[in-house]
């Protein structure tokens, strides 16, 4: 069974005091060891708290400020690139020559031309037959 933090603390203190009373360690060594143990424990607790906070915040749907700022920069860059592309497209359209219509052949007689209604009828029947 895992020790609770409180029992672990008392166990560690007991061990250090026994070593001190048996003459195995000097008070300075014990104090240094306790300080080191306290730092390690504090770092461990900070890491666990940080992991829990991050997991909880993530579950709630929040993001870190750094992630949000990075996303804003990315969106701004994409919008800037999009605006540049639009400017290039619009300038190309403005500079492109308008297409000219081919002249009608003079050999076509007015009597052989089809009316727009006949063309529309023919087109609709073709589309329907597909």
Image (cartoon, rainbow, N blue to C red):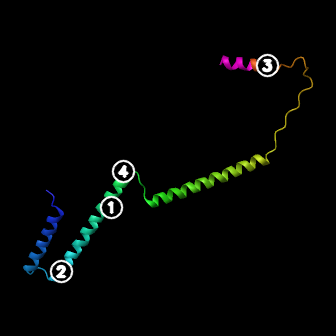
Q: Which residue was labeled with disc 1? A: 50
Q: Residue at x 87, y 17 (%)?
A: 112
Depth check, mark 2 against mark 3: the one in front is: 3
Secondary structure of the residue carrying numbered label 4: helix
Q: Quadrant of the C terminus?
A: top right
Nearer-N-terminus badge (3/4)? 4
Q: In the rendering, which numbered label is found on residue 111?
A: none
Q: Are marks 2 and 3 in contact (CB under 8 Å)?
A: no
Q: Which residue was labeled with disc 2? A: 29
Q: Which residue was labeled with disc 3? A: 117
Nearer-N-terminus badge (3/1)? 1
Nearer-N-terminus badge (2/3)? 2
Farthest-out residue, left: 22
Look at the picture and state if 72 lies above or below 102.
below
Nearer-N-terminus badge (2/1)? 2
Q: Residue at x 81, y 44 (%)?
A: 97
Dominant secondary structure of the magenta stretch?
helix
Give the Cα separation between the discs numbered 2 and 4. 45 Å
Q: Which residue was labeled with disc 4? A: 59
Nearer-N-terminus badge (2/4)? 2
Residue 84 in percent (x, y) is at 66, 54
Look at the picture and state if 11 lies above or below 59.
below
Q: Residues within 10 Å of mark 4 (few under 14, many from 20)?
A: few
Give the Cα separation between the discs numbered 3 and 1. 76 Å
Residue 100 in percent (x, y) is at 84, 37
Magenta span contains residue 127: yes
Q: Quadrant of the N terminus?
A: bottom left
For the magenta stretch, what is the residue range? 122-130
Count of all numbered marks drawn on residues in the image: 4
Residue 17 in the figure: left or right of residue 125: left
Q: Residues within 10 Å of mark 1 (few under 14, many from 20)?
A: few
Look at the picture and state if 36 lies above or below 119.
below
């Amino acid at each position: 069974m895992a020790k609770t933090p409180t029992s672990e603390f008392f166990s560690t203190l007991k061990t250090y005091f026994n070593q001190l009373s048996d003459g195995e360690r000097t008070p300075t060594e014990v104090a240094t060891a306790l300080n080191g143990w306290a730092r390690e424990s504090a770092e461990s607790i900070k890491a666990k708290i940080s992991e829990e906070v991050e997991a909880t915040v993530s579950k709630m749907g929040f993001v870190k400020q750094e992630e949000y700022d990075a996303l804003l920069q990315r969106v701004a860059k994409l919008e800037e690139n999009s605006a540049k592309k639009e400017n290039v497209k619009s300038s190309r359209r403005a500079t492109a020559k308008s297409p000219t219509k081919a002249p009608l052949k003079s050999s076509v007689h007015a009597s052989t031309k089809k009316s727009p209604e006949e063309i529309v009828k023919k087109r609709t029947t073709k589309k329907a037959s597909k």
